[in-house]
Amino acid sequence: MNYNHTVLKDRLLQTDRLYETVSAILAAAGRDGSQRSQLAESLCTITLEHGYSIRALIELDHVTSAIVLLRAQLEANVRSLWIHFAATDKWCVFRANVTADSA
């Protein structure tokens, strides 16, 4: 690895604690069962999954791949916030139906 091993190990442990905390917050969050809520939650889950993968890639010293995945994580995060706070109900219903038809 190109990094100070002790510093990297410390940052990876901090990352683990961060994702544990965020996961616990999301698990405790109230849900209203709406399509908006379900879509936003799905994207939050994808955001966390990307984060776990980025962490694993960095630990393996695959930094370039981790950086590429960082963009996908950011996009999923921004989209989940947009859906939760800005998307119209009509868009959420449409998108939920398209997603259900694709499954």
Image (tube, rainbow, N blue to C red):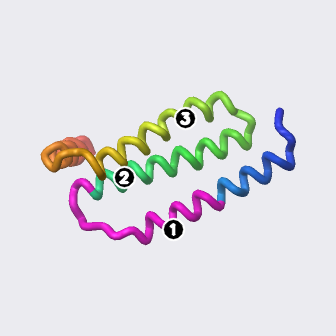
Across and down, in percent, residue 83 comes to 29, 47
The amino acid beneath tag 2 is Ser
- Is 58 or 87 nearer to us in this picture? 87
Relative to 7, is 92 on the left or the right?
left
| Secondary structure of residue under mark 3 | helix
State which region is magenta.
17-36
Q: Nearer the viewer, mark 1 or mark 2?
A: 1
| Secondary structure of residue under mark 2 | helix
- Classify mark 3: residues with Cα within 10 Å, few (<14), some (14-19) or many (20+): some
- Classify mark 2: residues with Cα within 10 Å, few (<14), some (14-19) or many (20+): few
In the displayed structure, 1 sits above or below 24; it is above
Q: Quadrant of the N terminus?
A: top right
Q: Which residue is mark 2?
A: 42
| Lower sequence index among marks 2 and 3 | 2
Across and down, in percent, residue 53 comes to 59, 44
Query: Total label count?
Result: 3
The amino acid beneath tag 1 is Ala
Tell me, for residue 37, which label it has, or none: none
Q: Which residue is mark 3?
A: 69
Q: Quadrant of residue 14?
A: bottom right
Q: Which residue is mark 1?
A: 24
Across and down, in percent, residue 48 comes to 51, 51
